[in-house]
Image (cartoon, grey):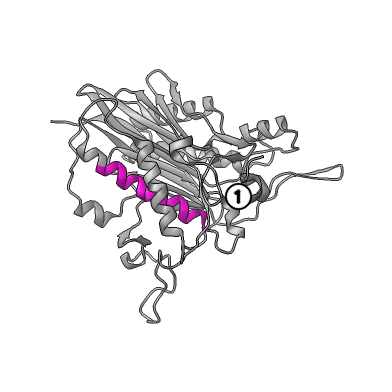
C-alpha cells in the first residue's frame, strides 16, 4: 500500500458531492456567493512587463490568455511569503491589496503567476504556460498551504525554464523541462522547510514553446498528476495531442510535496509535440477535464476561435475570450447537480454514488502559436 494513502490528504475526502446515507442519495447544494472569476492576457505584473526587455530571440511565440474560477478563496499566504498589514491608517487593512508591496515574495523576488483557489497559473513571457493544482484538503491542516506549494513550484519552474531558453539553440533535444521541474520542487521543499514547516502537495503541467527549425515549432508538454496539456488544431477541428493522467487511485493523482513519494525525475512525463502556426495549446486543471469531455473541449475552443476571428465579440483579446469561454463551460457543469460529467462517470465505475459535475477550482491557460515577424 502506498504511504500516500494515510499521509497525504486526497481530494475525495473533502468533496461536498453526493452522499450515500443509508439508502438515501443526497445531491449537492452550493451556497450562493459571488463567483471568484478573473481573466487576462498574462499573469505578469504590468510594472514587470514594462521593465522587462525581450531577451529570447525565437521564431515563434504564444498569443496568450487565461481565465480562472475559484470554488472558494484561497488561504492567505503566511509570512514570510506575504507581508502583514502595517498599523498605519493609510495602509490597506488586508494582505490582498493590489499595492506592489503587498505582492507575495520569496527570496527577495515577487512570486510569478497567479493563485486561483488552490491552483496556480502562470504565463511567463511568450513561451511558457503552466497550471498547478494544489490539493485542497491541506486547508484542514494547521500548517497546510496547498496554494503556496502550487504557486512556488510554478514560480521556480518558470525561472528555470527562462534561464534555459536563454542558452538553448534549436532542436528537439535543446531543453529539459523535467529537470527544471525537479529543481523547482527541490527549491520549494527548502523554502517551506524549517522554520516555516509549511505543508502541501500539488500536481503540475506545463507547455514550453520551442522550435526544431525556423519553420518547425514544437512544444515540450510536461505533466505530473491529473492536470492536462492539450493541443487543438482549429482548422481541422481536432485534438492532436493530450497528456495522460497519472493516478495512485481514484481521485488521488500523483503529486509533489509533503509525504508524497512522487518526484519529477521519477514520475513526470514530457513529450515533444510538433505543432503548427495557429494551433491552440491549453494547460488546464482537472476542473476542466472532470467536467467536460475531450470532444466538448475541442468544440468549445474551435467555436470560440471562429467567433473571435469573425469579429462577433469585438476587439477583445482572442485568447482571453477562448480561455473564458472554456472556463465558463466547465463552470456551468461543475455547478449543475444534475449534469453528466467525466468525473461522475469515473465515480460510478468505482462504485461511488455520485451525480452531476465536480465543483472545483477551474484554471485555463491558452496560447496560440504565432510566427514572429521580421
| Count of number-bearing discs | 1
Q: Position of residue 28 (x, y in %)?
A: 71, 47
Left or right of 236 on screen, residue 336: right
User: Above or below — where is 32 with respect to 367?
Assistant: below
Q: Farthest residue to the right: give it.
A: 23
Quadrant where the C terminus sits is top left
Please name the residue shown 35% across and 60% down the image.
Answer: 106
Please name the residue shown 58% across and 58% down the image.
Answer: 139
Asked whether the viewer can see residue 291, the reply is no
Left or right of 200 on screen, residue 108: left
Asked whether the viewer can see residue 35, the reply is yes
Residue sitting nearer the eye, 267 or 347: 267
Residue 316 included in the magenta stretch of the image: no
Q: Farthest residue to the top: give it.
A: 236
Q: Main secondary structure of the magenta part?
A: helix
Q: Position of residue 156 (x, y in %)?
A: 35, 49
Please name the residue shown 52% across and 49% down the image.
Answer: 201
User: Above or below — where is 349 with respect to 236?
Assistant: below
Which residues lie in the magenta part?
145-163
Q: Quadrant of residue 247?
A: top right
Q: Farthest residue to the left: give it.
A: 374
User: Above or below — where is 305 with respect to 90?
Assistant: above
Left or right of 17 on screen, residue 307: left
Quadrant where the N terminus sits is top right
Q: Position of residue 265 (x, y in %)?
A: 43, 37
> According to the image, label 1 marks what residue?
8
**Could you say whether the residue bearing mark 1 is in a helix, strand or loop?**
loop
Q: Position of residue 228 (x, y in %)?
A: 48, 34
Q: Rate crowding at label 1 as few (under 14), some (14 to 19) or many (20 or more) other CA atoms within 10 Å.
A: many
Amino acid at each position: 500500500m502506498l504511504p500516500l494513502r494515510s499521509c497525504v490528504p486526497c481530494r475525495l475526502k473533502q468533496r461536498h458531492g453526493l452522499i450515500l446515507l443509508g439508502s438515501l442519495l443526497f445531491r449537492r447544494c452550493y451556497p450562493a456567493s459571488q463567483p471568484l472569476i478573473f481573466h487576462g492576457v498574462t499573469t505578469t505584473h504590468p510594472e514587470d512587463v514594462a521593465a522587462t526587455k525581450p531577451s529570447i530571440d525565437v521564431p515563434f511565440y504564444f498569443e496568450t490568455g487565461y481565465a480562472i474560477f475559484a470554488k472558494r478563496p484561497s488561504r492567505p499566504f503566511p509570512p514570510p511569503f506575504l507581508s502583514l498589514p502595517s498599523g498605519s491608517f493609510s495602509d490597506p487593512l488586508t494582505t490582498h491589496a493590489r499595492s506592489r508591496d503587498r505582492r507575495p515574495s520569496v527570496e527577495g523576488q515577487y512570486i510569478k503567476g497567479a493563485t486561483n483557489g488552490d491552483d496556480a497559473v502562470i504565463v511567463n513571457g511568450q513561451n511558457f504556460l503552466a497550471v498547478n493544482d494544489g490539493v485542497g484538503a491541506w486547508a484542514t491542516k494547521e500548517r497546510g498551504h496547498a496554494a503556496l506549494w502550487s504557486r512556488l513550484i510554478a514560480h521556480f519552474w518558470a525561472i528555470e525554464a527562462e534561464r534555459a531558453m536563454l542558452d538553448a539553440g534549436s532542436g528537439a533535444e535543446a531543453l529539459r523541462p523535467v529537470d527544471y521541474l525537479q529543481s523547482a520542487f527541490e527549491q520549494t521543499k527548502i523554502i517551506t522547510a524549517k522554520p516555516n514547516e509549511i505543508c502541501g502537495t500539488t500536481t503540475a503541467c506545463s507547455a514550453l514553446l520551442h522550435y526544431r527549425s525556423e519553420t518547425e515549432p514544437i512544444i515540450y508538454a510536461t505533466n505530473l498528476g491529473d492536470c492536462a496539456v492539450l493541443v487543438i488544431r482549429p482548422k481541422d477541428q481536432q485534438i492532436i495531442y493530450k497528456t495522460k493522467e497519472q493516478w495512485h487511485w481514484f481521485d488521488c493523482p500523483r503529486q509533489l510535496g509533503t509525504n508524497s513519494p512522487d518526484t519529477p525525475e521519477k514520475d513526470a512525463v514530457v513529450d515533444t509535440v510538433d505543432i503548427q502556426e495557429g494551433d491552440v495549446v491549453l494547460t488546464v486543471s482537472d476542473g476542466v477535464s472532470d467536467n467536460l469531455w475531450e470532444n466538448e473541449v475541442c468544440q468549445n475552443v474551435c467555436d470560440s476561435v471562429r467567433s473571435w476571428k469573425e469579429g462577433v465579440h469585438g476587439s477583445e483579446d482572442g485568447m482571453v475570450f477562448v480561455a473564458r469561454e472554456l472556463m465558463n463551460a466547465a463552470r456551468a457543469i461543475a455547478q449543475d447537480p444534475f449534469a453528466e460529467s467525466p468525473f461522475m462517470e469515473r465515480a460510478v465505475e468505482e462504485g461511488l454514488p455520485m451525480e452531476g459535475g465536480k465543483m472545483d477550482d477551474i484554471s485555463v491557460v491558452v496560447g496560440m502559436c504565432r510566427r514572429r515577424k521580421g
